[in-house]
């Protein structure tokens, strides 16, 4: 069965299951690497006062960004192509083991996007994905144990219907400047950031 069709069939079956259980059918989860997207950044950010759904992000503020930069203990973390492949594989593995339905993934040099259907809260899913990615990177010798790789939290959006899931998958797969791919993984390595 073609992978894209397989993904759509799983979205449809997840929709009816989630509707029956009163849960989101999937989550759009995003997190950044440590030090690459600080509060006050020109791209905007989320803090305690700017974290309500459908409200404005924290506006750019160079003073805030510089203050946050001074608190960094290590240089910002950027993932090279090999590290991105390691994180990608680790995320696919944890999803397989937990029987979570990973619909899309984009591991970039400074952030990760995942669209996943799971039977756990999105914060727990994100924690597991980050943990497995960290362990795999340390095991491969990319980073030393104890080195902070990821930001403390990230974004967790609930996807309640097929249209929301399709939009999130499209964003992750097509709008991240990557070649579209669905599971199973076929050894693609993306050299771009």
Image: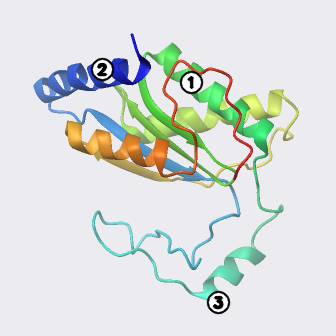
Nearest the eye: 88 or 57: 88
The mark found on residue 92 in the picture is 1
Say which residue label 3 marks: 63
Residue 19 is situated, as x and y percent measured from the top left of the image, at 13, 29
The nearer-to-camera label among 3 and 2 is 2
| Numbered circle sitting on residue 10 | 2
Residue 31 horizontal/vertical position (percent): 55, 51
Between 192 and 60, the residue placed more toward the observer is 192
The reply to whether the C-beta atoms of the residues labelled 3 and 2 are less than 8 Å apart is: no
- For residue 155, say whether it is visible: yes
Total count of labels:
3
* Camera-side mark, 1 or 3: 1
- The answer for how far apart the CA atoms under marks 3 and 2 are is 46 Å
| Image location (x, y in percent) of residue 168 | 36, 45
Q: CA distance from mark 1 to mark 3?
A: 39 Å
- Where on the picture, by quarter, is residue 13? top left
Please tell me in which quadrant of the rendered image residue 64 appears. Answer: bottom right
Q: Is residue 57 left or right of residue 165?
A: right
| Residue 100 can be seen in this image | no
Q: Are marks 1 and 2 in contact (CB under 8 Å)?
A: no
**Of callouts 1 and 2, the N-terminal one:** 2
Q: Residue at x 29, y 63 (%)?
A: 53
Q: Residues within 10 Å of mark 3 (few under 14, many from 20)?
A: few
Indicate which disc residue 24 carries: none
Which secondary structure lies at badge 3?
A: helix
């Amino acid at each position: 069965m073609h992978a894209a069709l397989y993904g759509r069939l799983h979205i449809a079956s997840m929709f009816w299951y989630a509707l029956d259980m009163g849960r989101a059918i999937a989550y759009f989860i995003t997190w950044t690497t440590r030090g690459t997207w600080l509060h006050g950044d020109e791209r905007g950010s989320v803090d305690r006062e700017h974290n309500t759904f459908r409200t404005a992000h924290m506006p750019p503020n160079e003073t805030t960004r510089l203050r946050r930069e001074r608190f960094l203990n290590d240089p910002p973390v950027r993932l090279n192509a090999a590290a991105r492949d390691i994180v990608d594989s680790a995320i696919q593995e944890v999803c397989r083991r937990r029987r979570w339905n990973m619909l899309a993934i984009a591991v970039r040099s400074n952030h990760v996007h995942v669209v996943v259907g799971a039977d756990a809260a999105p914060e727990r899913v994100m924690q597991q994905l980050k943990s497995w990615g960290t362990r795999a990177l340390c095991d491969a010798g990319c980073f030393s144990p104890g080195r902070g790789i990821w930001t403390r939290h990230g974004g967790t959006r609930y996807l309640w219907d097929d249209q929301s899931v399709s939009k999130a998958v499209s964003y992750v797969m097509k709008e991240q400047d990557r070649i579209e791919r669905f599971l199973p993984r076929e050894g693609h390595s993306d050299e771009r950031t």
